[in-house]
Amino acid sequence: MTFTAKKNPDSPTVAVIGAGAAGMMAAIQAARQGAKVFLFERNEHPGKKLRITGKGRCNLTNNCERDEFLENVPTNPRFLYPAVSAFSPQDTMRFFEALGVPLKTERGKRVFPQSDRAQDIVDALEKECREQKVIFLHERVTGILTEGGKASGVRTDRGSYRSDAVILCTGGVSYPGTGSTGDGYQFASALGHTVIPPMPSLVPLVEQGRFCAEMQGLSLRNIAFRIVRTDGEKVVYEDFGELLFTHFGLSGPVVLSASAHLPDMVPGKYEAQIDLKPALDEKKLDHRILSDFEKYKNRDFSNALSDLLPQKMIAPLVARSGIDPAKKVHSVTRKEREGLIRLIKCLRIRLFGFRSIDEAIITRGGVSVKEVNPGSMESKLIQGLYFAGEVLDLDAYTGGFNLQIAFSTAVLAGTHAAGSAVKKNEGKETVQ
């Protein structure tokens, strides 16, 4: 989906608040439609949060079809149907490749720049903004101006700016050091919008106790992971992949994705269960253990598991198994061995809660989508006010889905904001 436009000195104006992924994309699309665009960013440089996404590699989208994409959006997926239909993951890929950024698709259909440099994505967006004559203003916006129920500009710490439309792209409250401090929620709330209380999503999980801390720094691949409710062991999430033990609990891809399924987290309500050997059923695992015990038949139990488990995990698991670590393996009973098998196939970790929202990749909550037109991203309460990106009550799993939400909503917001601005200034502007 591409837009071309011819601007003249009398072009209508669009103010975009926030120069992150959504803000720069919205500014580009509005400018391509013929609008004169002012992009407000409090930081000295745009894309501060974008530069650290994907551990600095920038997983910018997921190369999947629309329906699969929406299956990876747990919060308000139906609202995104028009946006993802209008600007799909494939459109995002074509957009950046047209800007000179070669891309690659990795495991799980995750798309990255071939350079593995998030900075290349930021540079491409900033360069295109400047090509489209977007005007960057490094000022902190303090409010949105309205007249007669219509957006009419923005107020900053240096003065006021008139505009024909305003696009709010301020992000959430995760990674506040990048500028995401929740200002957008305050602006929207002041204009009558409902803001769903922000919570962390895609965030590490804190354990009850110190079991994980004993294995701090240990990363496991190819494990089966699930979250269950402790009141009845109802499974609320399950996945297969990689996790990391930390000094506070659990992190890693499967853990971050799991956090998106736990909006009602309270201490002790949920438990993580890890299958350390998902490729082996209990019978095969027993055979494997017996083989190792035969190999190390003269060793103590604690010294006979090095072929089966990572070294850092042996002592904590031996302690939890209840088997005397000094017991010779040829003396380990069948009952003790069955307990060890259950422990390996279902390592239980009681959860206390989330890490701080400061450590969350994204924010759950935000401006209620019930008050936003899904086909244009325009406010249903304030004419000429548009939203894009994380400021909305939308969040998805890891894998490039959240950045795609930012790009898709931004394209709609930028396109329609420019269009509504043109209507306000009919006779002054011709868009081609």
Image (cartoon, rainbow, N blue to C red):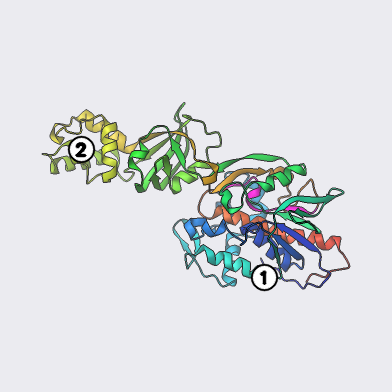
Left or right: residue 187 compared with residue 273? right
Q: Is residue 392 magenta?
A: yes
* Viewer-side residue, 116 vs 341: 116
Q: What quarter of the picture does the C terminus occupy?
A: bottom right
Label 1 – label 2 distance at C-alpha: 63 Å
Res. 130 mark = 1
Image vertical order of residue 53 relative to residue 426, above or below = above
Left or right: residue 338 compared with residue 354? left
Residue that badge 2 annotates: 302
Q: Is residue 2 magenta?
A: no
Q: What quarter of the picture does the N terminus occupy?
A: bottom right
| Residue found farthest to the front | 158
Across and down, in percent, residue 89 comes to 58, 60
Residue extent of the magenta highlight: 384-395
The answer, for residue 86, to whether it is visible in the render is no
Left or right: residue 368 compared with residue 299? right
Helix, strand or loop at disc 1? helix
- Identified by mark 1, the residue type is Arg
